[in-house]
Amino acid sequence: MHRAATIVLAALLFIPLTSRADAAKGKTSYDQRCASCHGPTGAGDGPVAASLPPGTVRNLHTGPFKFATDAAKLKELLQKGGAALGLNPLMPPAAGASDEELGHLVEYVMSLRK
């Protein structure tokens, strides 16, 4: 019984560390894939956004989001891109991203919501 309780406690202590590690990995992916439009902090003020009509690039700090209302839908948006979902066609898919990378990216983007 004591061994089982130790394993459960260790697992519960590990969960928050995993989430932080995922978000940290997601930030790296975000910086490479998303920051040019959404900006370094997700405010929708990246260098590409300046050349687009106002309101074209979403501020990731605010919601509610039209489609990406939860992690699964955000992952789908990242996989498929905006055009495939009837959303902004300028939102590209995360081409070549692994399932693991998408998971990290979702974790990071979800952490930006205020």
Image: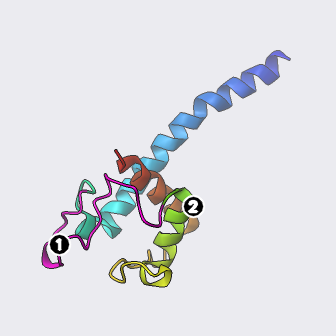
What residue is rendered at 34% in x and 44% in y?
Answer: 114
N-terminal label among 1 and 2: 1
Q: Amino acid at mark 2?
A: Ala
Q: Residue 29: which numbered mark, if any?
A: none
SS for callout 2 = helix
Q: Using the image, determine if residue 8 lies above or below residue 113.
A: above
Q: Position of residue 82 (x, y in %)?
A: 42, 78
How is this picture coloured?
rainbow
Q: Nearer the viewer, mark 1 or mark 2?
A: 1
Viewer-closest of 50 and 19: 50
Quadrant where the N terminus sits is: top right
Residue at horizontal 57%, vertical 66%?
Answer: 99
On screen, residue 20 versus residue 27, left or right, reads right
Q: Nearest the camera: 3 or 16?
A: 16
Q: Using the image, determine if residue 91 lies above or below residue 26.
A: below
Magenta-drawn segment: 43-68
Q: How many marks?
A: 2
Residue under the image location 36 percent in, 77 percent down? 91
Amino acid carrying mark 1 in the image: Pro
- Residue 90, percent from left and from top: 32, 81
Which residue is situated farthest in the right direction here? 1
Report how far apart the C-alphas of labels 1 and 2 lie in the structure. Answer: 28 Å
Q: Is residue 48 magenta?
A: yes
Q: Position of residue 40 (x, y in %)?
A: 23, 57
Residue at numbered disc 2: 72
Q: Main secondary structure of the magenta part?
A: loop
Q: Secondary structure at mark 1?
A: loop
Density class for disc 2 (Cα within 10 Å; few <14, some 14-19, many ≥20) is few
Q: Tell me the crowding category of disc 1: few under 14, some 14 to 19, or many 20 or more residues within 10 angstroms, Cα based.
A: few
Find out whether residue 107 is within the magenta segment.
no
Give the label on residue 54, or none.
1
8 relative to 71, above or below: above
